[in-house]
Amino acid sequence: MVSPKNYRLGAILLFAAALASLLVTLYAYFTPLTGVTGTAGALLVVVANVILLLAALVLPGLQGRGMRNLVRVLVLLGLIGTAFAGLLLHLWTVPVAMAVGLIGLIIDMTRPARAAPVTATRG
């Protein structure tokens, strides 16, 4: 039997990828001579990563199929947009982290739509 905890791995991976990307982007935003210090583009990527972090926290708790699929589509768009913005900012680790986040999203998609009822068997 598959444990429900195994399906949280996707959200954990998504959270870790967004956190890594956030740390890299915050470093580039605040450190002088990175080329993107104080720019609006770097700040936009910071905000996008915070939104992805929040989505990774919300995703495991969603029960309805429609809401879960909506959040997944929005996370996918966020991953693509953040990866593209990272490329434009020459922060090469951001697209790599977003690729890891995409793997986490794919793992989360393998979660069943409804938890199967637990039945006890007697031997």
Image: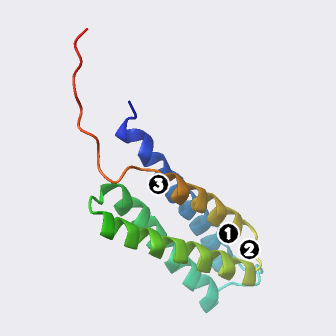
Task: Report the side of 36 relative to 61 (left or right).
Answer: right
Residues at marks 3 and 2 touching, judged by CB atoms closer than 8 Å: no
Q: Residues within 10 Å of mark 2 (few under 14, many from 20)?
A: many
**Residue drawn at (60%, 80%) of the image:** 81
Q: CA distance from mark 3 to mark 2?
A: 26 Å
Q: As rendered, which of 79 and 94 lies closer to the eye?
A: 79
Q: In this picture, is 29 found above or below 62?
A: below
Image height check: is 29 above or below 99? below
The amino acid beneath tag 3 is Asp
Q: Amino acid at mark 2?
A: Leu
- Residue 89 against residue 51 in the figure, above or below: below
- The one of 100 and 25 positioned closer to us in this rendering: 100
- Quadrant holding the N terminus: top left
Q: In the drawing, what numbered circle is on residue 94?
A: 1
Left or right of 66? Residue 55 is right
Q: Nearer the viewer, residue 122 or 26?
A: 122
Residue lying at the far bottom of the rendered structure: 40
Q: Residue at x 63, y 66 (%)?
A: 98
Label 3 or label 2, whichever lies nearer to me, is 3
Q: Which residue is mark 2?
A: 91
Query: Residue 112: x, y in percent?
Result: 38, 49
Residue at image location 63% in from the left, 73% down from the top: 25
Helix, strand or loop at mark 2:
loop
Point out the image quarter for the C terminus: top left
Distance from disc 2 to disc 1, alpha carbons, whole Å, reads 6 Å
Determine the secondary structure under disc 3. Answer: helix
Q: Which mark is residue 108?
A: 3
Residue type of the residue flagged with mark 1: Val
